[in-house]
């Protein structure tokens, strides 16, 4: 009996094992959270399908298919490093910028909303085109690298200055992370789906495109119509006023300006 108990002791985790399991679980959770709603999810799904086919070929003893899939998986690890290069670079960058590794004084959510609404309202009044992307759980570092990297506090004056016509950064997008402007003049991906409204310009298509690939909240000011629009999860809400914009941001921003929570949307 004592011998059996000693053998079962092997399967009982110690406190160090529990710590390691929790660390690995946390890292896997953060990894899945990071790649959700990005192209990496589709690629990962494809890899899982190939892996399932490989295991099935082993069970059914389909030697030729097993050999081909085994070779594909063997060299697929190297290919994955190339395919996932932007995501890996963004993940390492966001790790260094993690709030767990730095101490910051968060800007109150109401103050941040006031600054953004004030800037957007004034830009619309002047018919100045603008596009502002607010990061949520999915990192936008990949897109921030296409523009001028910044690290300045969000303010209405700063946003209006960036989008002033004739300045080098006015044509690109501003990316906001928490209460900081992290990039200006960034290039965003255009939507890959057909847009029925031919009146939508490049900024609107870029806003929809980014909201399709990530969970970002994107604000657009049209320089032709001076109307404000918001894109979330591939859907564009057009011609909103400052009160509606404040309502959307109020449902998205926490008390302290950390990553944004889901915002209410409507077509």
Image: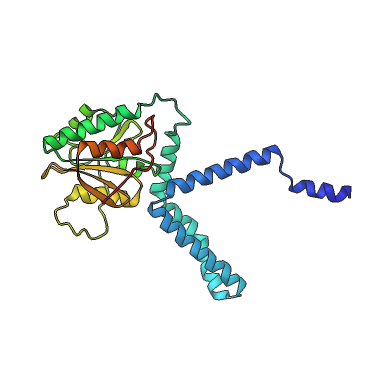
Q: Is residue 55 left or right of residue 89?
A: right
Whole-percent x, y for residue 229 in the image: 21, 44
Question: Which colour assignment does the render follow?
Answer: rainbow
Residue most extreme to the top: 105
Whole-percent x, y for residue 88 in the image: 43, 46
Q: Is residue 260 left or right of residue 16?
A: left
The quarter holding residue 136 reads top left
Residue most extreme to the right: 1
Q: Residue at x 35, y 41 (%)?
A: 141
Q: Residue at x 45, y 55 (%)?
A: 80
Whole-percent x, y for residue 51 in the image: 53, 63
Is 189 above or below relative to 249?
below
Which of the pair 93/79 is nearer the observer? 93
Q: Residue at x 15, y 33 (%)?
A: 164
Is 235 above or below relative to 154?
below
Q: Residue at x 57, y 72 (%)?
A: 57
Q: Is residue 91 left or right of residue 16?
A: left
């Amino acid at each position: 009996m004592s011998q059996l108990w000693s053998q079962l002791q092997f399967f009982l985790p110690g406190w160090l094992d529990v710590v390691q399991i929790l660390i690995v679980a946390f890292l896997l959770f953060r990894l899945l959270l990071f790649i959700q709603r990005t192209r990496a999810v589709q690629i990962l799904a494809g890899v899982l399908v190939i892996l399932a086919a490989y295991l099935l070929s082993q069970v059914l003893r389909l030697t030729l298919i097993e050999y081909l899939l085994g070779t594909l998986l063997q060299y697929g690890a190297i290919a994955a490093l190339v395919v996932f290069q932007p995501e890996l670079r963004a993940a390492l960058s966001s790790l260094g910028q993690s709030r767990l590794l730095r101490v910051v004084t968060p800007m109150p959510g109401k103050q941040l909303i006031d600054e953004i609404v004030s800037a957007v309202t004034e830009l619309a009044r002047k018919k100045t085109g603008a596009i502002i992307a607010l990061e949520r759980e999915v990192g936008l570092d990949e897109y921030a690298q296409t523009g001028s990297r910044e690290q300045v506090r969000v303010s209405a004056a700063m946003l209006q200055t960036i989008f002033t016509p004739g300045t080098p950064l006015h044509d690109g997008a501003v990316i906001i992370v928490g209460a900081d402007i992290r990039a200006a003049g960034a290039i965003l991906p255009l939507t890959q789906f057909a847009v029925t409204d031919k009146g939508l310009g490049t900024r609107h298509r870029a806003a929809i495109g980014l909201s399709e690939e990530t969970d970002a909240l994107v604000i657009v000011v049209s320089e032709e119509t001076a109307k404000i629009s918001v894109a979330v999860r591939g859907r564009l809400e057009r011609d909103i006023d400052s009160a509606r914009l404040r309502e959307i941001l109020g449902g998205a921003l926490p008390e302290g300006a950390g990553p944004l929570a889901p915002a209410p949307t409507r077509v």
